């Protein structure tokens, strides 16, 4: 049962449209005007400090966890040092754009155009990237939907899991600042390296002092409000808030409430410093439990109070929105910030890790139905039945949460990426489905590559079907291919070229991040950066894992190659030339052929004819990508993640031999193509589990929809639990379920006002269904609904 | 007649991910052929061995399909359920399939209309972990009129199954127009309480999901039947409990 307080905050979260605040950008700009000529790390850190010093402090009604990114309760901010061109170009339509609209007034627009953007002209990461990326890579990689890494040059990296266990809760930011001061004092100042380290430590001190300053300003505000408060109960709450903010994040938390407040201040610091994607609270149940246990033991906290605090934190995590371009919003639809929070699994020692906070986290998500945090669970084969029961019960509520992960495969993925075993056991999720760890620097969603484009160029002389432009390598006409192997060879040649451009685009962005956007605040949250004096952007973390290239369209390409093999080479129903012609015509005039293509074997039905092609492509992709190394000399990694990238990547893709028409969606992760996994979810699971998931250290994703009836009883939930464990025993990493009926989704589409709290799984994350554009909604509805038998 | 072959048989469908015909996740093998002629039947293609909706399959083909599902069946405590049609109608084929799955350690269940020769089928029944046996109408004349087969054999088999020591559930297709009125159900339950005291039973409400199959076979869809309300179903379960019978559900 939600408390009245939480229900009120929740209603506001559901009803309010997010507003853009330019306060952070204004303070940032004015600060940079004062620090010209200083080292870039100092300039960024000083701007952060100034933000903490000057940003309006807002404690909203009923809040128990405080701290706001701007003056609005549901609020997004601007980060012009990363990018502003797109904001300038798009903000006039922020209110009306189909995916993730924001409220911004004409006065605000005028103000930022006059007082903020002019300063950043020529100075932003975006402009630097566009100036430096080679023209032939830009042609493929800038706003094309073929290779896409726009979130890495229009946005900050994010993708960090703050280390509560060994840094933040152990020392507080006060301890971090003290350590940085001591390190700084011990530097000789007589060599290049120590001069750089000195800048780093100064930047960390500014960042740590900044977040402590902000917390103390909140303490002041809470005291001021308490003095004026007429309601005795609220007055006492405000006094507690004031005490909390005096103590954290400067010092280690003294209570569960303080620990929760600390987590939000850390998120807030990360948001103000870089508006990050995927700033992950990590293994919440592990680092929160000691505070819970101590408070409960001492009689200071009840289970219900702890639940309310967790729910308040969930709402905080959901009230700030990630301000992104329309293009990025196509890839990451649903105001999603990807703050991934992981519960369950095993401890570093290998014991079952579940505890009462694990269950409270699941309950909080069930009750508040917020789209944040991205709730992930680690399930191991010997996990307590109650835990699997709680997980499947939450699945049955139809929120799309939690994302369910295989404990053993996450561990294996990190081992493969070079982690020490104990650290690998301690993994948490990052963003949507990336196994990650709190001492890691990694670009976990560095770039997306469109597998379908490679096939398109192989079959269309290197040209785009939709634009006619030469986008791939020149290729001989499809009619000249005489064997299936020749077709595959041409596909891999084109694919190789797209991977090459993905690497180039990423390396250019990585180098620029090193030059332009050091990360003092988040470096302060990572152990090794402090001890070695190296910023995250310079590879300061204990583990620097190579950037992840996400493959989009595995199912489309496997289905297409299978259809092509069957129709042209096995059944000799059609020649290569005729098939190429049909694709050029977008199947118009070739309907019988299209029907034959649709009838060919499809990935997701446990049919080795096509599944073997998916495996081959995925393995080839792994080998191809791992040839390359990033700016730290680390091998690039592969992933088959979701997000919503299969829509924009489908939009630029012409007709494909699987029977798909021009511009229709591509496929996500290792999921079957929507609507073609027509056997059972078990067959879809078997197909997906064949793809050697553990080698793709950037994560793999399978989304399935289940008829709600199937999991509406305890018995149904038990069967679902068994299904999940079997899928994991087969070697898979992740699965997530939408259990809402299509009828409900159609109703929500027709009457969005009545379904504002309806959460659905998009791909790797959940969001409010009504906040998705019409085309996204249609895509969700189109996913095969596996009915009960 | 193929019904005498042990290495191949007529199969209506192999349905993976069945969750209502026994414990856990199951694969249900629907074998064609049935001696009864119930006009409400949801699987009309099971009424004959050979028709546009059935396939002649070898035992190996059936088993190789089932084996792909084993991880899910075992992981969930499920198994294989034989249904139909009437699975004992192709007894030699059923014997081959069930004994080979039994030897592979797969948990087995059988759904039967109750019309078969117990002595001939006893060895196959012994391989089952669970038997679902239908009881459709308590009146001998009405039973013969509706199903085309005598009630006596069904009752005899009910008694034998109950005495066999194999776990069983009596299934009652509950259909307005056939039996779904209090008097008939009471008589049916009284009979059960007498010959299978304390039996588990499941009322299955009439549904029209099989209408598409009638259309596919070019036959008129059943008429004159309807589904009892949830309230009526509750009442019937209550009547069963009053007689010491145990209503169960695989939902």
Image (cartoon, rainbow, N blue to C red):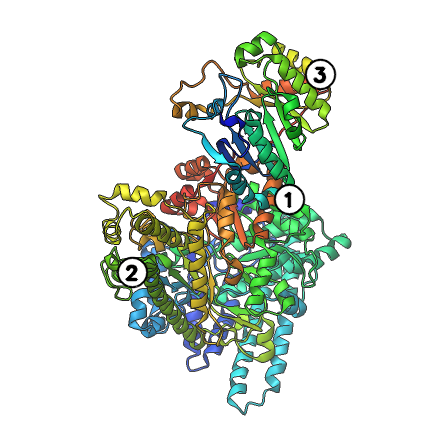
- Residue at figure coordinates x 41%, y 73% from the top left: A507
Callout 3 and callout 1 share a chain: no
Q: Provide the secondary structure element on which disc 1 rests.
A: helix
- Check disc 3 and report the residue beneath it: B195
Compare residues A744 and B211 and report the one nearer the observer.
B211
The residue carrying mark 1 is A389
| Residue at which label 2 appears | A457
**Residue sitting nearer the eye, A481 or A165:** A481
Q: Count of labels shown?
A: 3
Number of other residues with Cα within 10 Å of mark 1, as a class: few under 14, some 14 to 19, many 20 or more: some
| Front residue of this view, candidates A359 and A260 | A359
Q: From the viewer's perspective, is the residue at label 3 or at label 1 nearer?
A: 3
Query: In the image, what residue occupies the spot 27% across and 64% down?
Result: A471
Viewer-closest of B193 and A259: B193
Asked if residue B70 lies left or right of residue A45, the reply is right
Quarter of the figure with residue A456: bottom left
Estimate the spatial distance between the alpha carbons at disc 1 and disc 2, rounded to whole Å. Answer: 48 Å
Image height of A207 relative to A304, above or below: below
Q: Secondary structure at mark 3?
A: helix
Asked whether residue A84 appears in the rendered view, the answer is no
Q: CA distance from mark 3 to mark 1?
A: 39 Å
Q: Residue A72: where, in percent of width, then height?
A: 47, 55
Q: For the residue labelled by badge 2, is the local secondary structure a helix, a strand or a loop?
A: helix
Crowd class of label 2 (few under 14; some 14 to 19; many from 20; radius 10 Å): many
Of pointers 1 and 2, the one earlier in the residue sequence: 1
- Residue A606 in percent (x, y) is at 48, 47
In the figure, A745 relative to A47: above or below?
A: above
């Amino acid at each position: 049962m939600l408390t009245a307080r939480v229900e009120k905050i929740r209603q506001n979260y559901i009803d309010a449209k997010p507003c853009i605040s330019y306060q952070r950008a204004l303070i940032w700009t004015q600060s940079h005007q004062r620090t010209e000529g200083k080292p870039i790390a100092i300039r960024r850190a000083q701007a952060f400090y100034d933000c903490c010093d000057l940003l309006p402090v807002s404690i909203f009604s009923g809040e128990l966890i405080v701290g706001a990114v701007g003056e609005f309760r549901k609020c997004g901010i601007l980060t012009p040092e990363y990018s502003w061109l797109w904001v300038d170009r798009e903000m006039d339509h922020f209110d009306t754009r189909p995916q993730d609209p924001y409220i911004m007034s004409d006065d605000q627009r005028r103000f930022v155009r006059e007082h903020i953007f002019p300063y950043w002209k020529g100075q932003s990461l975006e402009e630097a990237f566009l100036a430096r990326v080679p023209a032939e890579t830009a042609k493929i990689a800038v706003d094309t939907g073929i290779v896409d890494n726009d979130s890495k040059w229009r946005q900050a990296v994010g993708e960090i899991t703050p280390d509560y266990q060994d840094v933040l809760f152990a020392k507080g930011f006060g301890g971090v600042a003290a350590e940085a001061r001591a390190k700084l004092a011990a530097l000789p100042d007589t060599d290049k390296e120590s001069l750089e380290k000195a800048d780093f430590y100064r930047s960390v001190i500014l960042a740590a002092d900044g977040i402590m300053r902000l917390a103390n300003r909140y303490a002041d505000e809470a005291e001021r409000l308490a003095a004026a408060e007429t309601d005795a109960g609220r007055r006492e709450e405000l006094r507690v808030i004031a005490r909390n903010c005096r103590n954290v994040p400067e010092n280690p938390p003294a209570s569960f409430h303080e620990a929760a407040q600390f987590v939000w201040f850390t998120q807030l610091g990360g948001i103000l410093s870089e508006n990050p994607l995927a700033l992950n609270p990590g293994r919440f149940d592990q680092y929160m439990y000691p505070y819970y246990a101590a408070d409960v033991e001492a009689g200071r906290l009840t289970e219900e109070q702890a639940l309310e605090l967790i729910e308040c934190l969930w709402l905080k995590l959901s009230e700030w929105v990630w301000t992104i371009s329309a293009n990025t919003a196509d890839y990451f639809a649903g105001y999603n910030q990807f703050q991934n929070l992981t519960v369950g699994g095993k401890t570093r020692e290998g014991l079952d890790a579940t505890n009462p906070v694990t269950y409270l986290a699941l309950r909080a998500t069930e009750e508040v139905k917020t789209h944040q945090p991205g709730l992930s669970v680690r399930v191991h084969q010997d996990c307590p039945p109650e835990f699997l029961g709680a997980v499947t019960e939450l699945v049955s509520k139809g929120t799309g949460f939690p994302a369910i992960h295989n404990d053993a495969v996450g561990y294996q993925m990190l081992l493969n990426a070079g982690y020490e075993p104990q650290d690998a056991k301690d993994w948490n999720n990052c963003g949507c489905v990336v196994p990650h760890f709190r001492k890691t620097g990694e670009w976990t969603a560095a770039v997306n590559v469109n597998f379908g484009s490679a096939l398109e160029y192989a079959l269309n002389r290197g040209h785009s079907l939709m634009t006619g432009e030469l986008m791939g390598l020149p290729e001989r006409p499809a009619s000249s291919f005489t064997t299936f192997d020749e077709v595959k060879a041409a596909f891999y040649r084109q694919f190789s070229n797209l991977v090459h451009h993905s690497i180039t685009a990423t390396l250019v962005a990585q180098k620029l991040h090193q030059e332009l956007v050091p990360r003092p605040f988040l470096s302060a949250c990572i152990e090794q950066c402090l001890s070695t004096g190296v910023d995250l952007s310079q590879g300061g973390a204990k583990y620097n894992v190579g950037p992840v290239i996400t493959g989009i369209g595995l199912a489309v390409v496997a289905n297409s190659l299978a259809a092509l093999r069957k129709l042209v080479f096995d059944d000799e129903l059609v020649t290569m030339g005729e098939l190429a012609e049909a694709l050029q015509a977008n199947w118009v005039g070739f309907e019988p052929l299209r029907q034959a293509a649709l009838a060919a074997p499809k990935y997701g039905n446990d049919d080795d004819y096509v599944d073997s092609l998916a495996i081959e492509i995925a393995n080839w992709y792994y080998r191809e990508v791992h040839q390359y190394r990033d700016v730290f000399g680390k091998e690039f990694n592969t992933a088959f993640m979701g997000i919503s990238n299969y829509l924009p990547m489908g939009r630029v893709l012409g007709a494909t031999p699987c029977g798909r028409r021009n511009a229709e969606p591509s496929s996500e992760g290792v999921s079957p193509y929507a609507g073609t996994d027509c056997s059972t979810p078990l067959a879809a699971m078997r197909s997906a589990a064949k793809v050697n998931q553990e080698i793709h250290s950037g994560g793999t994703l399978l989304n399935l929809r289940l008829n709600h009836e199937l999991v509406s009883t305890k018995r149904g939930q038990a069967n679902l639990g068994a299904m999940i464990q079997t899928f994991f025993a087969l070697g898979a990493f992740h699965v997530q379920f939408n259990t809402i009926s299509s009828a409900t989704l159609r109703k929500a589409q027709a009457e969005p006002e009545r379904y504002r709290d309806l959460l659905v799984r998009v791909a790797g994350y959940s969001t409010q269904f009504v906040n998705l554009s019409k085309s996204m909604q249609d895509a969700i509805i189109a996913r095969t609904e596996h009915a009960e038998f | 007649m193929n019904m005498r072959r042990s290495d191949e048989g007529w199969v209506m469908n192999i349905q993976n991910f069945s969750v209502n015909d026994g414990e856990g996740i199951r694969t249900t093998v629907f074998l064609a052929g049935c001696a009864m002629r119930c006009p409400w039947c949801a699987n009309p293609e099971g009424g004959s061995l050979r028709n546009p909706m059935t396939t002649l399959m070898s035992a190996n083909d059936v088993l190789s399909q089932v084996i792909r599902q084993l991880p899910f069946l075992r992981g969930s405590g499920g198994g294989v359920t034989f249904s139909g049609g009437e699975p004992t109608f192709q007894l030699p084929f059923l014997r081959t399939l069930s004994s080979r799955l039994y030897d592979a350690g797969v948990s087995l269940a059988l759904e039967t209309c109750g019309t078969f020769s117990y002595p001939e089928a006893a060895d196959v029944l012994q391989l089952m972990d669970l038997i679902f046996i239908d009881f459709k109408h308590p009146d001998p004349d009405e039973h013969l009129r509706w199903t085309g087969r005598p009630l006596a054999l069904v009752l005899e088999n009910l008694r034998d199954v109950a005495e066999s020591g194999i776990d069983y559930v009596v299934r009652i297709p509950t259909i307005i127009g056939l039996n779904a009125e209090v008097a008939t159900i009471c008589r049916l339950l009284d009979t059960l309480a007498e010959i299978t005291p304390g039996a588990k039973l499941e009322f299955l409400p009439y549904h029209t999901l099989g209408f598409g199959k009638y259309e596919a076979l070019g036959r008129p869809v059943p008429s004159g039947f309807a589904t009892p309300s949830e309230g009526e179903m509750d009442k019937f379960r209550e009547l069963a409990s009053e007689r010491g019978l145990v209503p169960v559900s695989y939902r």
